[in-house]
Image (cartoon, helix red, strand yellow):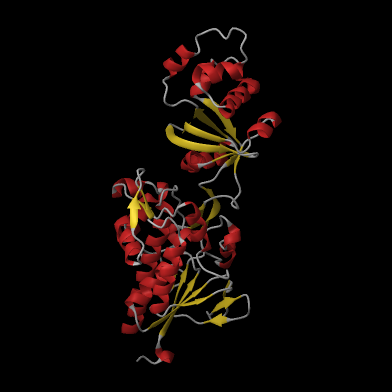
Amino acid sequence: MSNPAQMQRVAIIGGGPAGLMAAEVIATAHADVSVTVFDRMPSPARKLLMAGRGGLNITHSEPAERFRGRYGTASGWMAAHLDTFPASALVAWCEALGQPTFTGSSGRVFPKAMKASPLLRAWLARLTDLGVRLVPRAQWTGWNADGALTFLDGTTVTADATVLALGGASWPRLGADGSWTALLPGIAITPLQPANCGFTVAWSAPFRDRHAGAPLKRIALSFAGRTVRGEAMITAAGIEGGAVYALSALLREAINRDGCARLQIDLRPDLTAEAVDDLLAESRRGASLSNFLRKRINLPPVAIGLVQEALHAGDSATPLATLIKAVPIQLLAPSGLERAISTAGGIALDELDNRLMLKHRPGVFVAGEMLDWEAPTGGYLLQGCMATGVVAGRGVVKWLQSRTSD
């Protein structure tokens, strides 16, 4: 048995997927290391549990090269981390916890239980067996003059290595609010912004009152040369939903640059523009526009409302068929971080070595959404968090080994 006083101590700050994965990697590789996870909330991984309410999408089955490309401008440096812990490894890890998986028709991978809670229970039990200790209601506040970690309740902790995995700033009520940015002076941090988010639109009062909460199904959204098929939802403040989230990075950056973004919605992507034009060629014969569009091309009320919004906003000279195939929506701003699924921005790549250790704070590693990357929904977010958790955990193991051998 090792002498507890001589054991090296690792502190994990943040009990989400990235932090828990780092803890597992370290505890599995190093039996003589004391690993403690500190989380500000009463229980860990609350955002994971929230994500699992509609079916926990753990990763995606598409080819690795396409998978890596989902990380946008971070694809280059994220590729090495994703290769360290690819989708196949995440699936094997999940099944080793007694949670078999299946691949849906879209290529997304889910636990058969379709929930996060059984997976999380099995994971926490494994971590307990490995000797990992979880400390809830522990809000990290930085370091003191002696280099010890400090917490809101006055506790201090001296660690031989630390993993910061405090998440981004989306859904702050679940624990990750981005306040950690103030605790890292001198570290370059790209401003945190909403990702996989909805957008605000200045709807007319009649449209908003009638259609807020209405789904837009079987549509295609286009912006900046990219088209995404899927669904969306009209809200009182704007528009959100899976198809919108897929374009959110492009839309957000356009708004940052130009002040607004003009999204186009194809309300009948199953029909060509010529087919729509032919269907609308018949005279209306006194029928209202709503009835005409409903009968001729089977548009639902919310889609008809969008066409009417465009006509009232000044597009009356645009042919109806053109509007139906590309009705314009002016987006004014991303929805707030409190409703975004994930966060863009974070600690800049230049601040880290290839083990995800801060260059200016040796022994301090970073994982998960604290890093400057973003990805769409579809399993890529969780995969990115888990992969960087593995890399940071392995980095800690090598760091501790180097200190022992010195």
Query: Residue at 57% across / 77% down in the picture?
Result: 150
Q: Is residue 205 left or right of residue 391?
A: right
Residue 246: percent from left, percent from top: 46, 42
Up the image or down, 370 lies above or below 323; here it is below
Up the image or down, 21 lies above or below 262; here it is below
Residue 34: percent from left, percent from top: 42, 82
Query: Residue at 29% across / 50% down in the picture?
Result: 64
Q: Which quadrant of the rendered structure holds the C terminus?
A: bottom left
Up the image or down, 70 lies above or below 230; here it is below
Q: Would residue 223 be seen by someone viewing this image from the given angle?
A: no
Q: Is residue 199 left or right of residue 108?
A: right
Residue 324: percent from left, percent from top: 51, 22
Query: Residue at 54% across / 66% down in the picture?
Result: 184
To which quarter of the image does residue 262 belong? top right
Q: Which quadrant of the rendered structure holds the N terminus?
A: bottom left
Query: Residue at 60% across / 24% down in the picture?
Result: 310
For this rendering, which residue is in front, 302 or 254? 302
Picture mark count = 0
Q: Would residue 370 be seen by someone viewing this image from the given angle?
A: yes
Residue 23: percent from left, percent from top: 41, 72
Up the image or down, 233 lies above or below 129; here it is above
For this rendering, which residue is in front, 257 or 13? 13
